[in-house]
Amino acid sequence: MRIVLVGPPGAGKGTQAAFLAKNLKIPHISTGDLFRANISQGTELGKQAKAFMDAGNLVPDEVTIGMAHDRMTQPDAENGFLLDGFPRNVSQAEALDESLKTDGQKLDAVLDLEVPEDEVVKRIAGRRICRNDSSHVFHVTYSKPKTDGVCDVCGGELYQRGDDQEETVRKRLDVYHRETEPIIDHYKAQGLVVTISALGKVDEVTKRAMDALKGDK
Ligand code: AP5
Ligand code: ZN
C-alpha cells in the first residue's frame, strides 16, 4: 500500500505511523525525521534545512522533493510506503503525483488525522524525543517513559525539540492551515481522503486508522 498521512503538527502522525507501518509491513518515511537525522549528522542538507525548521517554516521544495524521492525509491519501499510529513504543500503533492505516474504507481489512501488545536498544543508541549532516533517519541503525561528522560527503546537521552517552543508551534500551525491543508482538497478530488478523529488513546486511534484503511480498500 502507498499511504500519505496528513494532519497538523502534534496530531500523532509519527506515533501512529510507527504502528501502522509495522502492521502493514511498509516503511515509515518521515521527511521531518530525515531532516533531523541530517542535522544531527551535520550534512550539507541538514545545514540547509535547519534555519527553516527552527523558524517553523517549510524547507524549500528544491531540497525536500529530491530528498523524499531518493528515500521513496529505496528497495525497501518498492511495494509501498507510509509518508509522514510529505507532501506538505500542493506543489509537493503534484511532484509526488508525477513521479508515481512515471513509475506506473498510485496512492491507495490519504489518511487525514483530525485533532482540535488545544489538544495539539498539549501534545506538543509534553513531547520528548530520543537523541539517537527521533522516531522514538514520548510524552511527559500521555506516554511516559519508564525512567524520566530515558528512551524505553534504546536507552538514549530524551529532549524537547527546538521547534516545540510555543511561539514556533503557533507558526507551524499557521503554516499547516495555509500551505498543507489545501492538499486535502487536492486528494479529495482524486477520491483518496479518509478522515478519522485522532482523539483518544494511541491504540484506539491505530485501530480506527486500520479499520478506515481496510474499509476504504
Ligand atoms: P515534522 O517532523 O513533520 O513535524 P510536524 O508535522 O510538525 O509533526 P510533529 O512531528 O510535530 O507531530 P506528529 O503529528 O508526528 O505528532 P507525534 O506523533 O510526535 O516537521 C518538522 C519540520 O520539518 C517542519 O516544520 C518543516 O520545517 C520541516 N519539514 C518536514 N517535512 C517537510 C516537507 N515535506 N516540506 C517542507 N518542510 C518539511 O505526537 C505528538 C505528541 O503527542 C507526542 O509526545 C506523543 O507521545 C503524543 N501523542 C501522540 N498520540 C497521542 C494520543 N492518542 N494521545 C495522547 N498523546 C498522544
Ligand atoms: Zn531511542
Image (cartoon, rainbow, N blue to C red):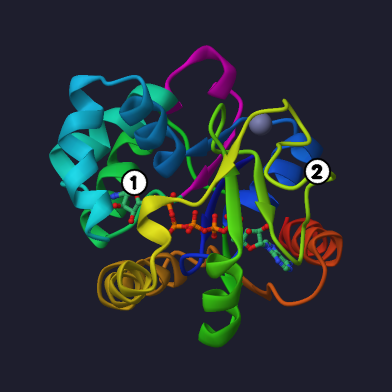
Mark identifier at residue 97 = 1
Who's the residue at 42% across and 65% down the image? 187
Q: Quadrant of residue 110?
A: bottom right
Q: Name the residue under label 2.
A: 147
Q: Point out the tag, 2 or 1, that comes first from the N-terminus.
A: 1
Q: Does 184 sit left or right of 156 as displayed?
A: left
Residue farthest top in this picture: 75
Q: Quadrant of the N terminus?
A: top right
Q: What amino acid is labelled 1 in the image?
A: Asp
| Mark 1 Cβ and ligand 1 under 8 Å apart | no
From this viewpoint, is residue 62 visible?
yes
Badge 2: residue crowd in 10 Å (few <14, some 14–19, many ≥20): few
Helix, strand or loop at label 1? It is helix
Badge 1: residue crowd in 10 Å (few <14, some 14–19, many ≥20): some
Region rendered in magenta: 72-84
Helix, strand or loop at label 2? It is loop
Q: Quadrant of residue 197?
A: bottom right
Residue 62 placement (x, y as % from top left) = 14, 38
Who's the residue at 51% across and 36% down the image? 29
Residue 173 placement (x, y as % from top left) = 36, 74
As for residue 91 lying within the magenta part, the answer is no
**Residue toward you, 163 or 178:** 163
Residue farthest front in this picture: 148
